[in-house]
Amino acid sequence: MAETPGFNHHKIVAKDTAGSSSSQDDSHLHIQPGQQSLALQNAVESSHVATPDHGESNIPSRFELFLLGPGEHKVDCEVDTRIPNSMMFTFHKEDHTLGNLLRSRLLTSPHVYFSAYRVPHPLVSDFELRIQTDGEITPKAALVQACRDIVQDLGKLGREFTKEWELRRMVTQEGQRGAGAGGDV
C-alpha cells in the first residue's frame, strides 16, 4: 500500500476464537466468521494506535471539544465590510446546537434581515454566525438580545419542568398511599 504524506495509516490485528492472528490494513478490513465479537474492540483500539509521525491518532481529546485554552476567547467578531450593518461572529468550542438556536431566535427579531451559521469543518467545534440588521440596532446588540431571550426561555422551561415533575411525584405518592389503604380493609 502506498503511504500518503500527512495521513495516519493503522494496522488492525484481529484474533479469532481459535487464537490465530491476522493483520490487515483498516481501509480493507474484512471481518471473518468468529471475529465479529472483536470488531468493536478492534475499532476502538485502532483509534488509539500510536503512529510514527504524530505519536497518537488524530482524534482530539474529549475535553478539547468544550474547554477553552489559555488566551482563547469564546466568541470572536469582525465587521463585514461587504454588506452594510453586518457582522461575522465565530463561536469556539460550540456546535450546531447553539448555532441553530441563535439563528432561529435572531430571525424572530424584526430588526434582523439575515441570520445564518455554518460549521467550517466537521471535526472542529467552531461555527460562524453572520447577522445583518436594518441599522436601527447593531448585529452585536441583536445577538446579545437573542441570548437574553434564550436564557429567559430556558429558565421558564426549567421552572415548568420542575413543577410538572413535582406534580407527577405527588400524584404517584397519593396513588401508592390509596392502594396501601385499600388493601388493609
Image (cartoon, rainbow, N blue to C red):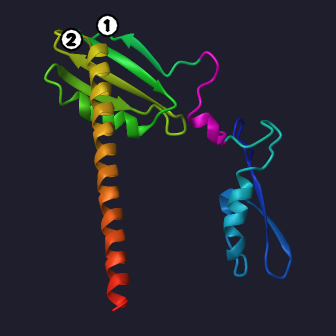
Tell me if residue 2 comes above or below residue 60 in the rendering: below
Q: Nearer the viewer, residue 150 or 128?
A: 150
As drawn, the label of residue 137 is 2
Mark found first going from the N terminus, 1 or 2? 1
Q: Quadrant of residue 165?
A: bottom left
| Residue visible at 37% across and 89% down in the picture | 184
- How crowded is the residue under tag 2: few (<14 C-alpha within 10 Å), some, or many (20+)? few
Query: Which region of the structure is painted magenta?
Result: 59-71
Tell me if residue 6 comes above or below residue 132 in the rendering: below
Q: Nearer the viewer, residue 176 or 42?
A: 176
In-image side of 152 versus 65 (left or right): left
The percent coordinates of residue 135 (x first, y second) are: 18, 9
| Residue visible at 29% across and 32% down in the picture | 152
The percent coordinates of residue 11 (x first, y second) are: 77, 56
In-image side of 75 versus 156 (left or right): right
Residue sitting farthest toward the front: 185
Residue type marked 2: Ile
**Residue at mark 1:** 81
